[in-house]
Image (spheres, grey):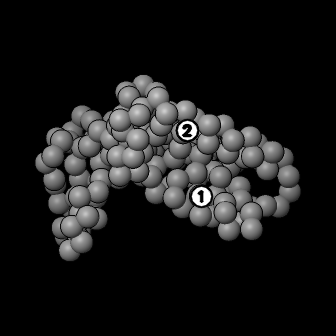
Amino acid sequence: MSFMIAAAVLFMIDFIFKGMAEERLSENKRIPICNGKLFLTKFHNKGAFLGALQNRPELLKGISYGIIVMCTVIYLLTLGKKGKTMLKIGLTCLLGGAYSNAYDRMKKEYVVDYFGFQSKNKRLSQMVFNLSDFMIAIGAVTAVFAAA
């Protein structure tokens, strides 16, 4: 039960941050924070990572929801078993983030991204993320290593 609560908390934290970004930030205006190492902005991402499939929204939704359903089934089957703590943690992070981004995609047709890294690497400096993106990545890596 505590893993499900953690997933819900991750969802809510990002939901709150996305709402604040929508209300308080402007698109294409960067606000430097953390001594200029990070920036806040608002970006409506109609695709997946780096805008992938933005021209195929129905395919993106189908793939996203399919993966979420598959991971949710694995998650629910895993929660009932003793042990497998790292797999549970990984799936908790992955699904907390995935549910948040899927909610945006369902309600708004885009995902709200709100911060990025200022870097000498031009490509990295152009990317904008949200907390869910990192939870999905961390959760996926953790789940894969735990399942191996």
90 or 23: nearer the viewer:
90
28 or 52: nearer the viewer:
52
Question: Where is mark 2, residue-wise?
Answer: 63
User: Compared with residue 93, is residue 57 higher up or lower down, i.e. above or below?
Assistant: above
Quadrant housing residue 123: bottom left
72 or 15: nearer the viewer:
72
Sort mark 2 into few (<14), some (14-19) or many (20+) by Cα contacts within 10 Å.
few
Q: Position of residue 11 (x, y in %)?
A: 51, 42
**Which residue is most to the left?**
29
Task: Choose the circle earlier in sequence order: 2 or 1.
Answer: 2
How much space separates mark 2 and mark 1, taking CA atoms?
A: 16 Å
Point 42% across, 25% down: residue: 107
Point 38% across, 29% down: residue: 109
Q: On the rendered image, what quadrant is the C terminus found in?
A: bottom right
**Which residue is most to the top?**
107
What's the amino acid at mark 1? Ala
Point 22% across, 48% down: residue: 41
Q: Position of residue 84 (x, y in %)?
A: 78, 61
What's the amino acid at mark 2? Ile
Q: Is residue 6 left or right of residue 49?
A: right
Res 140 label:
1
Callout 1: helix, strand or loop? Answer: helix
User: Compared with residue 4, is residue 61 higher up or lower down, i.e. above or below?
Assistant: above
Please tell me whether mark 2 or mark 1 is closer to you in this view: 2
Q: Is residue 52 left or right of residue 68?
A: left
Q: On the rendered image, what quadrant is the N terminus found in?
A: top right
Residue 16 visible in the picture: no
Point 58% across, 58% down: residue: 139
26 or 145: nearer the viewer:
145
Q: Position of residue 13 (x, y in %)?
A: 45, 45
Residue 88 visible in the picture: yes
